[in-house]
Amino acid sequence: MMYTIATLGSHTALQIMKGAKDEGFSTLLITQSDREAFYRRFRFIDDIITISSYGDFPEVQHSISRRHVIVIPHGSFIAYLGIEGNKAISLPYFGNKAVLDWEADRKKQLNWLASAGIRLPRKFSRRDRIDRPVIVKSYGADGGRGYFVAHSQKDFEKKISLFTKKDFIVQEYIVGVPIYLHYYYSPITKTMELLSIDRRYETNVDSLGRMPLAHQERIDITPSFVVVGNSPLSLRESLLPEAYAMAERLVVTSQKLIDERGLFGPFCLETIVTPDQQFYVIEVSCRIVAGTNLFIDSSPYASLLYDEPMSTGRRIARDIKIAHRKGIVDCLVS
Ligand code: AMP
Ligand code: AMP
């Protein structure tokens, strides 16, 4: 019996459902009742189950467990169910749950990235003398909400006394362009694929330059990093070899540090590229990211690898299909 691909109705659900249907799977969406009518517009969604809030997902698990379901997690799984909620999902869950702790704990994540030889912004501990602009970030992905920038030790101390979040890191503020690289590592074919790239559009930081400096100086503007959209990007070709190499090192390192399966499936390196063409990695996101929604129809990079449209959502389904034929679906889920 063929599997049914299921996910929560939010974030990248349309892409995941369309990709699954393109690969011949049945599709099942679990969504809040207020979004049911919206999702019914799309013919590639075979079945919809409604819940009153995303946090109620665990309650429907039992009733769908007989349907041969594989759950594909995306950003909303973390936002609404939390790490523990994800670990507790009893249905087959695409990806390696052992990676969740390494991603969620910023210290562990930085250790993993550093062990992979990836360049990171300098980290300041609270006792350090801050000698350059810094960004203060709370833990856990929340679309860039609740961050602040300080330009000196004094400025930092003033602002931190008003900061309500308990867990945060203080990082060198890298001046460069944010570039988000979307990868897929297949444990079936053992290949790394760079499927697409986006840049984020963040309010208000991306619009500060629209105001002349003289105006900026007269009004007290606090830069914020709340994501409101994404735009596609092609990378200078000479940067592509390093884009691949970083991701490969990250996967190999995860197999030593986390467990032998390590990181696989879709993931994203969030980078800032400086004028000397160095990638500084600010975060790794270990599942499908929202920026891939730009490329439901494929991307320039995916079309170099595939002679047919290939989104990240479809790529996931393709691996499940191949694994199913070989009888090795277990190696894709946890
Ligand atoms: P939403 O369904 O819009 O409430 O988003 C669910 C989760 O995904 C939240 O944690 C958001 O911060 C995150 N998210 C949504 N869209 C984006 C995006 N374009 N880029 C990065 N994160 C996003
Ligand atoms: P994150 O939640 O770590 O993905 O960061 C959200 C946004 O904050 C990024 O897209 C950047 O615009 C900004 N940001 C995060 N860390 C840094 C950094 N070290 N230097 C400059 N900007 C940063």
Image: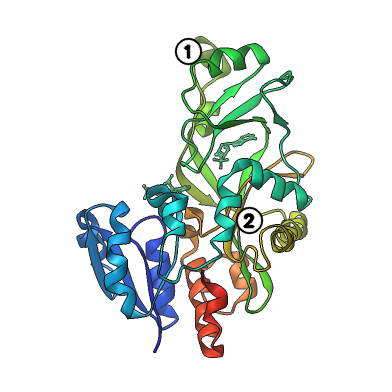
Image quadrant in which the N terminus is located: bottom left
Residue at x 26% of width, y 52% of height: 53
Label 1 sits on a secondary structure element that is loop
**Disc 2 residue type (three-letter):** Ser
Task: Give how far across and how far down residue 138 sits, in percent.
Answer: 53, 33
The answer to the question of whether label 2 and label 1 lie on touching residues, with beta carbons closer than 8 A, is no
Residue 22, placed above or below residue 176: below
Residue 5, placed above or below residue 271: below
Q: Which badge, 2 or 1, comes first in the chain's sequence? A: 1
Q: Residues within 10 Å of mark 2 (few under 14, many from 20)?
A: some
Q: Which mark is residue 234?
A: 2
Task: Give how far across and how far down residue 3 sits, in percent.
Answer: 40, 81
Mark pair 2, 1: CA separation: 35 Å
Question: Is residue 260 or residue 187 the one in the foreground?
Answer: 260
Q: Residues within 10 Å of mark 1 (few under 14, many from 20)?
A: few
Whether residue 275 is visible to the viewer of this picture, yes or no, is yes
How many marks on residues? 2
Q: Is residue 63 left or right of residue 10?
A: left
Disc 1: residue Cβ within 8 A of ligand 2's nearest atom: no
Q: Is residue 199 left or right of residue 145?
A: right
Task: Give how far across and how far down residue 21 sits, in percent.
Answer: 39, 78
**Disc 1 residue type (three-letter):** Ile
Residue 97, placed above or below residue 276: below
Whether residue 271 is visible to the viewer of this picture, yes or no, is no
Label 1: which residue?
219
Q: Which mark is residue 254?
A: none
Residue at x 51% of width, y 60% of height: 288
